[in-house]
Image: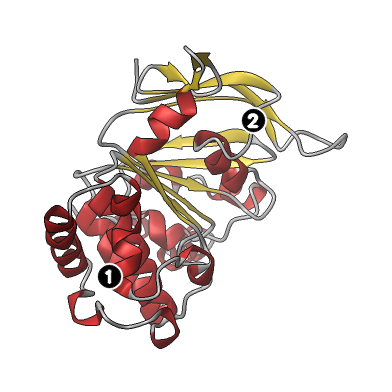
Amino acid sequence: MSFISINNLTFKYNRKGYVIDDLSLDIEKGEFVCILGHNGSGKSTLAKLIVGLLEPRKGHIYVNGLDINEEKDGVMNIDLVRKDMGIVFQNPDSQFVGITVKDDIAFGLENRRVSTEEMIDAVNKYSEKVGMKDFLDRNPEELSGGEKQRVAIAGILAMNTELIIFDEATSMLDPKGVREIIALIKKLKGQKTIISITHNLDEANFADRVIVLNKGKITLDGKPEDVFKQFDKLKEAGLDILNNMKLIDKINNSNIDECNKKVIEDALWELSFPK
């Protein structure tokens, strides 16, 4: 079984239409999956279902072979698998729980009763990994949004979770903060199972796989370079297209001869997805 296996998942908040509509999806261990969709497409709801913050109306979610909504010997499976999950939300302020950076990184380790020596080692190691070692004694009010998100990621890395979910983690950041977090996610690729929830196609360029949601259903699923060629379906899903793709679209509708069109299009795709 895949690391995450979602079967016929259905969810709605009220009597209106389904936010997640009979969705099935498998994600392998170590895979980096980017889930794209406009506001209301169901992508953030899906993230909350995977980590057990919401319970589906129908269907099943398995993480590491365990149905997260079942229990065994009085213990819910979600309580077991949640130890192997970390989620970074969109609002940096809503997830900072420590008085200082080092307190925040150590928070989860304290709850697991890790020894002081191990905790200090982990705080130093992972604060350095995310570029925040020089900020350990700072309080959150002194940090930018991007710096707060890097602290949140350090806390998850210190917990050594297999799965990290980025739920619109860059949507409230300035351009500098966005670049910082994208660069950090790139470094984590191949080291963890990553799910990145976003509406920004630029963040999906370096994913192993891109999934497009529209009205709670999967409309596209494949490698970025294959998914991003589906201009019409991306537009139907309410998504913008990459700048290079906009140029390709204009070139295809121009009077340039077909041979030159092909040369220019290939060059633009190569710029968008360098090997």
On the image, numbered disc 2 is attached to which residue?
Answer: 55
Q: Residue furthest top?
A: 73
- Mark 2 crowd level (few <14, some 14–19, many ≥20, 10 Å Cα): some
Residue at image coords 49%, 61%:
200
Q: Which residue: 71% across, 38% down?
A: 19
Q: Is residue 6 visible?
A: no
**Where in the figure is residue 169, as x and y percent of width and height?**
46, 61
Residue 21 image offset from top left, x and y in percent: 68, 28
Q: Is residue 66 above or below residue 193?
A: above
Q: Residue at x 63, y 54 (%)?
A: 38
Q: Is residue 270 above or below residue 36?
A: below
Q: Position of residue 14 (x, y in %)?
A: 83, 37
Quarter of the view holding residue 24 = top right
**Which residue shows up at 70% across the image and 40% down it?**
215
Q: Position of residue 120 (x, y in %)?
A: 15, 62
Say whether residue 87 is left or right of residue 2.
right
The residue at which mark 1 appears reads as 102
Element under disc 2: loop
Q: Residue type at mark 1?
A: Lys
